[in-house]
Amino acid sequence: MQKKFAIDIHESSAVNDTPEDREKYEDAMDCGWTIYRCSDTHIEDGTAIKVIRKVLELPEETD
């Protein structure tokens, strides 16, 4: 079964979603998409890649 996975990156200083944003996320989820919202901070500190690997069922990176 194919996974539908989307990543939404926003600035850590961004304020709340707009109603249009929420509608976009709801429509995508109704179509079977998993939406991962992360900030630039999550990318910089490595959190984003850990979550993405987990969702896609990829092995953890080793040094």
Image (spheres, rainbow, N blue to C red):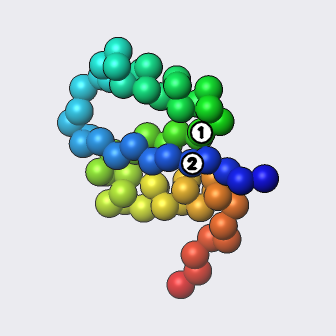
Marks 1 and 2, Cα distance to the nearest angstrom?
Answer: 5 Å
* Residue in view at x 46 percent, y 55 percent: 47
Tell me residue 5's x, y (percent). Answer: 57, 48
> Left or right: where does residue 16 sit relative to residue 23?
left
For disc 1, the neighbor class at 10 Å (few under 14, some 14 to 19, many from 20) is some
Above or below residue 34? Residue 54 is below
Q: Nearer the viewer, residue 56 or 20?
A: 20
* Residue in view at x 45 percent, y 47 percent: 7
Are the two marked residues, 1 and 2, in contact with CB atoms closer than 8 angstroms?
A: yes
Amino acid type, callout 1: Trp
Q: Regarding mark 1 in the picture, which secondary structure is present there? A: strand
Q: Residue furthest right?
A: 1
Amino acid type, callout 2: Phe
How many marks the image carries: the answer is 2
* Residue in view at x 21 percent, y 36 percent: 13
Q: Regarding mark 2 in the picture, which secondary structure is present there? A: strand
> Left or right: where does residue 13 sit relative to residue 2?
left
Q: Residue furthest bottom?
A: 63
For disc 2, the neighbor class at 10 Å (few under 14, some 14 to 19, many from 20) is some
Tell me residue 60's x, y (percent). Answer: 62, 70
Q: Earlier in the sequence, mark 1 or mark 2?
A: 2
Location of mark 2 (residue)? 5
Tell me residue 3's x, y (percent). Answer: 67, 51
Kindly identify which numbered label has been placed on residue 2: none
Above or below residue 58? Residue 3 is above
Location of mark 1 (residue)? 33
* Residue in view at x 59 percent, y 40 percent: 34
Q: Quadrant of residue 11?
A: top left
Above or below residue 35? Residue 51 is below
